[in-house]
Amino acid sequence: MNYRLLWRKTVNNIMLALTGVCALVTVAILFFILGYLVWNGGRDINWAFLTQLPKPVGETGGGMANAIVGSAKLLLVAALVGIPVGFIGGVYLSEFGGSAFPAVVRYTADLLNGVPSIVMGIFAYTVVVLPMHHFSALAGGLALGVMLIPIVLRTTEEFLRAVPQSLREGALALGANKWRAISSVVIPAAFRGIATGMLLSLARVAGETAPLLFTSFGNRFWSHGFNEATSSLPVMIYTYAISAYEDWHRQAWAAGLVLLALVLVANIGARVILARRQSPARG
Amino acid sequence: MSGSTVLVHGSLGGSGIPSTPGRARRWVRRLTSGDEIAHLITLIFAASIFLVTVLLVFELYRNSALPRHKFGWNFFVTSTWDPVAENFGALPFIYGTVVTSILALLIAVPLGVGGAIFLSELAPPRISDALTFVIELLAAVPSVIYGVLGVFVLVPLLRNYGEPVLKSTLGFLPLFQGPMYGVGFLAAGLVLAIMVVPFILSVSREVLLAVPLDQREAALALGATRWETTWKVVVPYARSGIFGSVFLALARALGETMAVTMVIGNDPKVAASLFAPGYSIAAVIANEFTEATGDLYTQALIELGLVLFILTFILNGLARLLILATTARGSEHA
């Protein structure tokens, strides 16, 4: 009987310790990734890397300025496509919803969110690249923009729903129309949360590589306007990492560090902003 | 909350049954005040999300007509991939995707569920929240960075240490035989495992936290140890939600492109050994799409994209339903 109890206690301790190990391993992976990138890529980040064009194969030095600007361009197009649709759709779900249709939209958005990014690339290819017969920043931006829609939609809806009902009632009691109440009371009240959500969603698609491979393609020079093949940070990292040149490998590490830093800063920043917003309201 | 929503809607929409002229006048007034217009505009944007999804399916379907007509179901069971002879069979890619995803789940499920149990049952809330945030950051790391680390760190480690050790200990299994390149199914499965753990962990933690407290208290009061309570009461209660998180992770793993492309070896073969280089659906699309010459070749790749889409669509749908069912049950109980 006592042995049985001892056995159960031993199992208890071992299994609980193992769960702790699982959590620790997972957390350790992040710190490993971060540490390794900083250690490996930090050496090669300098002014030239951030401001110069790539050098021809064989010459050392050069940078990824065109990829950084290209990524910014792609994100601009993505934001123009994804944010209005996601935001206004989110307003519908939160403020005008109620019947069966919002449930359909919500479910579709969740499924769209799970579509592999490479399939989004094919979609943008068939819709933009095939008719236009060439790669462009527009096609890449469209692929990223469609990926933005479900994320922006759900965060907008979530933050609008968190606005107390009494604020809406107050505005209506003062004689405002429904849309007036929404546009000048409800949306401003939730604005910080919604903006943070948009920032996060942009950070997420900024790191996407697969949908850009055959939409915006790549370019070793500056791209002009939005109708040319455009280089981007993630695609640049990919092509440099699988190349055969030592110098390109080092640049891939450096670019990886830049990309990871951007993504992590956006994520941590969003967390800080949201925490500050919530604490006084709760108190 | 829902009661007051009804109140707001009622005061605007006009409850009761007004006579027809009254209703028309009210409708005109609402239209001129802008509410109906705002409703319509937001409705159009919301509907466009549905339409984009439909368009996506339509485009994938329309642009894969050639290989569907030429190969039919044979596309999925033959393993020749010969762009020159225009003969396409997708079996090696489907095999690679399935093997790497299963491998990833075998590693990631115990790790993720174990970690989730620690974070929901043992760790103090403050520490649990902080660790969960760190783990969610892991989910935000772009996949190409996992690929870079895979190529330059994991693959050499596997080639020089991991695979020789596996071969000398478990080499009698066909899984761990043959030449060791580093790149291959094993490397891809490991990278995928690391990438999907955060998803399993954070969703599982969520559903475990949704299990009502009195379930735990009842088990502890009956004399169960902490582990017995967790494993025999809390986990079964949250079972379908945990399955949901696994489906979600599986959908992620199936569609993951960059990291897999960089470490799987890119060789369209069906091999029993995990050391062998292989190929996956997403990887072949990423590698060959821009080089594909001829409509049949491109459309064969688009058909692979369609397959990927359908698979993830089904898995995500199942996952959402399972997670929804569990969390709804938990909150209903509380």
Image (cartoon, coloured by chain):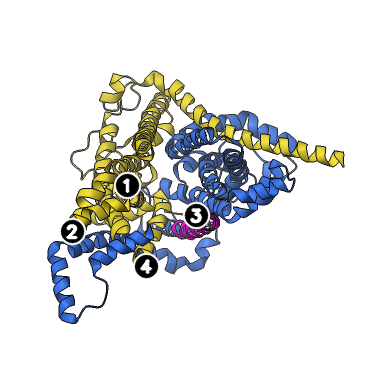
Chain colours: A yellow, B blue
Residue B313 shown in magenta: yes
Most prominent secondary structure in the magenta stretch?
Answer: helix
In space, the residues marked 1 and 4 are separated at their CA atoms by 29 Å
> Spatial distance from mark 3 to mark 4, Cα to Cα?
46 Å
Confirm or deny contact between disc 2 and disc 3 (CB under 8 A): no
Q: Which residue is mark 3?
A: B81
Amino acid carrying label 1: it is Leu
Eye-nearest disc, 3 or 1:
1
Label 4 or label 2, whichever lies nearer to me, is 2
Q: Is residue B278 above or below residue A249?
A: below
Q: Residue at x 32, y 42 (%)?
A: A193
Local packing at callout 4 (Cα closer than 10 Å; few below 14, some 14-19, many 20+) is few
* Residue drawn at the location 55% of the way across and 30% of the way down: A28
Q: Chain of mark 3?
A: B
Graded by Cα atoms within 10 Å as few (under 14), some (14 to 19) or many (20 or more), the crowding at tag 3 reads: some
Q: Considering depth in this image, is B291 or A119 the residue closer to the camera?
A: A119
Chain for mark 1?
A: A
